[in-house]
Amino acid sequence: MQERKTTYEIPVGPIHPALKENIRFTFQVEGERIRSVDVKPGFVHRGIEYMGMRRNLIQVLYLSERICGICSISHPIVLTQAVEQAANIEVPPRAQYIRVIVSELERIHSHLLWAGVAAHELGFDTLLHLSWKVREKVMDILEELTGNRVDYALPIFGGVRRDIAAEQYPKLMEMIRYYRGLFEELSDTFLRDPSVEARTRDVGVLTPKEAHELCAVGPVARASGLRKDVRQDWPYLVYGDFDLTALTPEDHGVEVHGDVYDRIIVRLLEVAQSLDLVERCLREMPEGEITSFPKIPALLAYLKKAEGEGIGRHEAPRGEVIHYVRLEAGQEGPAVWKVKAPTYSNLMPWTPMFREQEIADIPIIAASIDPCMCCMDRVHVDRGDTREALDKQALLRLSWEKTRRVCG
Amino acid sequence: MKLSAFKRALWVYHVPTGSCNGCDIEIVAALTPRYDVERFGIMLVGTPRHADVLLVTGTVTTPMADRLRRIYEQTPEPKAVVVVGGCGSTSGVFYDSYNVAGPVDEIIPVDVYIPGCPVRPEAIIDGVVKAVAKLEGLEAGEKV
């Protein structure tokens, strides 16, 4: 009798201990090997763009913070950039520096958070607790600067809402020294630990070609050797002054494999890079105004008269965030608001990463792109019981119709 | 309802139902060394079938409503449901969304609401303690 191999199906999600958020994977498995994967998002879609277009711009700013609790400075920063471009608002230099400082602090907290989650997915809970213990330091600083641990409510159109006081500088410097002192210990526990290396080396490989073709962004692309970083390629705020280069594992002196281990290296290097940036900002930050519109009613009145369109881009901890905004005179809210979050670009790279891997590696590969479903989730069309999926042609037709509708 | 389960370590299951990650990371922060609720025996578990307390975060999106109901049914009695965050308690900023089925208490019965956007880890610990106290009161025959 001829031996025939068949695949069987393993569904993972939308609620599963291996996933921190709701998404559905369907794996085709042969023995312990994954042959293919299908990803179905749409469980945390809250229709934020739709709600935003029915509110005034200041409310939209607070709503944009609630797109994601981890990137809660990235989305407002991008939205303010887009609106400032559309409405021709100048941002004072000091405000730009403050925005950079807080977004780099967010990168530190997000990468440490990820390091803990990744360690947990490897079954290395001691490392989870270590990473989250040291993360509390930057959370304290963020709370000190902005008044909240998670949603900071810092940027506003034309500047920022809070200044960094002179007595806060030493606290920031102390934090930088604390993390620099820890860096050796952290890279030792993550990069020279044989069990971490055994679980992550050559697991979930994404080749540079695949990363390029599938438009990976952020640390995922950089771990595959692409020097791609919005802060380097299209500098905004004051990043242009800093001569920043995107970091790849080569900067750590190792060859690029494009695996999970490389993603750990890149994120650790970026924590060090962010510390340098914060220190430099503190040294070079000029004195002066922190917003060009100190009075909120004046700002709202100005924005109501403004007309135009703008695009904001920012390198969030997970990659590039883009917001597109179109303002129309006489309308309080944006006429069009479109958000593209980094995880949206990093979904497709999951397919090659999972191929030919083992079932036991599903959690760490899924976590390795640092997925953030609440940022990227799109609506899932469910027409009755037909379970009809929209194909490429249908989607293209729908988007043409929408463009015509939006442009009039 | 026997509460002997609550006299020992309390096991918690975290259900995200459309949250923005803000409360979710604060729940993990409550478990890790700074706040360290594991010293009280409170531990996150991987399945609702092992749980005493459900921590529900986020307003409930339409696709998650039925799944939340199923998870509630899978949790053995006695159980307590704690809603973490403003949007799970009242729908919060997402009140006019087309994809929201409602706040958590429209889907399953809720015992404790923890307000905040996002909640602080201290508030989460306080909420879980209140849930236990409420259940103990119920057992003693108090009216809540």
Image (tube, rainbow, N blue to C red):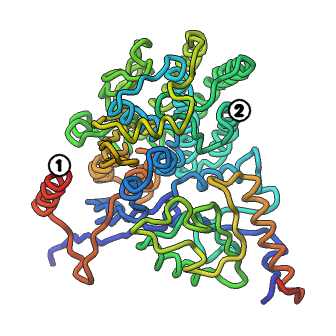
Per the image, label 2 sits on a secondary structure element best described as helix
Residue A281 picture location, percent across and down? 55, 16
Q: Image check: A211 left or right of A279?
A: left
Chain of the residue under the numbered disc 1 shown in the image: A
Using a 10 Å C-alpha cutoff, classify the residue at mark 1 as few (fewer than 14 neighbours), some (14 to 19) or many (20 or more).
Answer: few
According to the picture, the residue beneath numbered tag 1 turns out to be A407
Kindly identify the amino acid type of the residue bearing the numbered disc 1.
Cys
Using a 10 Å C-alpha cutoff, classify the residue at mark 2 as few (fewer than 14 neighbours), some (14 to 19) or many (20 or more).
Answer: some
Q: Image check: A400 left or right of B11?
A: left
Residue A16 picture location, percent across and down? 49, 66
- State the CA–CA distance, disc 2 to disc 1: 45 Å
Q: Nearer the viewer, residue A332 or B19?
A: A332
Per the image, label 1 sits on a secondary structure element best described as helix
Q: Is A285 located above or below residue A194 in the figure? A: above
According to the picture, the residue beneath numbered tag 2 turns out to be A144
Q: Quadrant of residue A86?
A: top left
Q: For the point 48% across and 59% down, which residue is it?
A: A21
Q: Quadrant location of the N terminus of chain B?
A: bottom right
Of tags 2 and 1, the one toward the viewer is: 1
Q: Quadrant location of the C terminus of chain B?
A: bottom right
Kindly identify the amino acid type of the residue bearing the numbered disc 2.
Glu
